């Protein structure tokens, strides 16, 4: 029992920030992301009794659980749109205040565009472009073929660009 707890503690310490970031990008809500991250690790702890399987396999399982928890949460609370945007307290000295605010505004608008994508497209584009995962890793997490994920990423990218253009979001 002690080995299992130590193994899960190591998995948590090494990966909780990545899972939180993924869920936050998906939900755009700090409190929801924290709750769903904790639920993800709790589900992982309850469901996987094997100690010592490879950490990359554990990560794929954690991303899959996080994705499913996020989808279930958003289905349950789909009538409530929450728009919280946390202002970064640590600012770079190289970026002017105006530029920083413009970038934050653009990021907020892009996050809103992400929320307009269907769940499968949103998940695929977040995992590909923000989490830097390969198509095969995304396919494993989402339970689809690599070719399906490839088409999904292309479609999501095109739709996101369309939404960005519609909302006049222009890169600097």
Image (cartoon, helix red, strand yellow):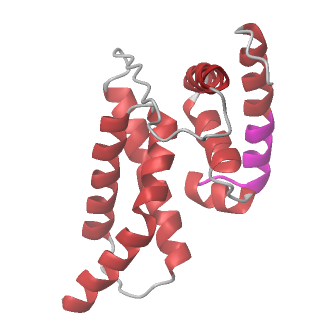
Write the residue at 61% across / 61% down.
140
* Image position, residue 24 (x, y; %): 45, 40
Q: Quadrant of the C terminus?
A: top right
Most foreground residue, 58 or 152: 58
Count of all numbered marks drawn on residues in the image: 0
Image-based side of 54 in relation to 20, left or right: right
State which quadrant residue 69 falls in.
top left
In the displayed structure, 154 sits above or below 84; it is below
The image shows residue 95 at horizontal and vertical percentages of 67, 34
Q: Residue at x 48, y 41 (%)?
A: 90
Q: Quadrant of the N terminus?
A: bottom left
> Which residue is drawn at the image coordinates 63% and 19% (left, top)?
98
Q: Which residues are magenta?
A: 143-154
Is residue 11 depicted above or below 105 in this figure? below
* Quadrant in the rendering for residue 17: bottom left
The chief SS type of the magenta part is: helix
> Residue 32's spot in the image, x, y percent?
32, 36
98 magenta-colored: no
């Amino acid at each position: 029992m002690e080995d299992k707890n130590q193994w899960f503690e190591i998995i948590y310490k090494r990966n909780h920030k990545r899972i939180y970031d993924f869920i936050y990008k998906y939900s755009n809500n700090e409190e929801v992301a924290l709750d769903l991250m904790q639920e993800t690790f709790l589900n992982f702890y309850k469901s996987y009794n094997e100690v010592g399987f490879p950490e990359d396999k554990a990560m794929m399982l954690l991303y899959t659980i996080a994705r499913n928890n996020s989808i279930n949460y958003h289905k349950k609370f789909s009538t409530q749109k929450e728009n919280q945007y946390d202002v970064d307290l640590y600012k770079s000295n190289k970026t002017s205040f105006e530029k920083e605010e413009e970038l934050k505004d653009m990021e907020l608008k892009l996050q809103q565009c992400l929320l307009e994508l269907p769940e499968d497209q949103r998940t695929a584009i977040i995992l590909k472009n923000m989490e830097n995962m390969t198509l095969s890793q995304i396919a494993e997490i989402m339970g689809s073929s690599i070719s399906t994920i490839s088409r999904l990423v292309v479609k999501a990218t095109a739709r996101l660009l369309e939404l960005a253009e519609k909302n006049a979001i222009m890169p600097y």
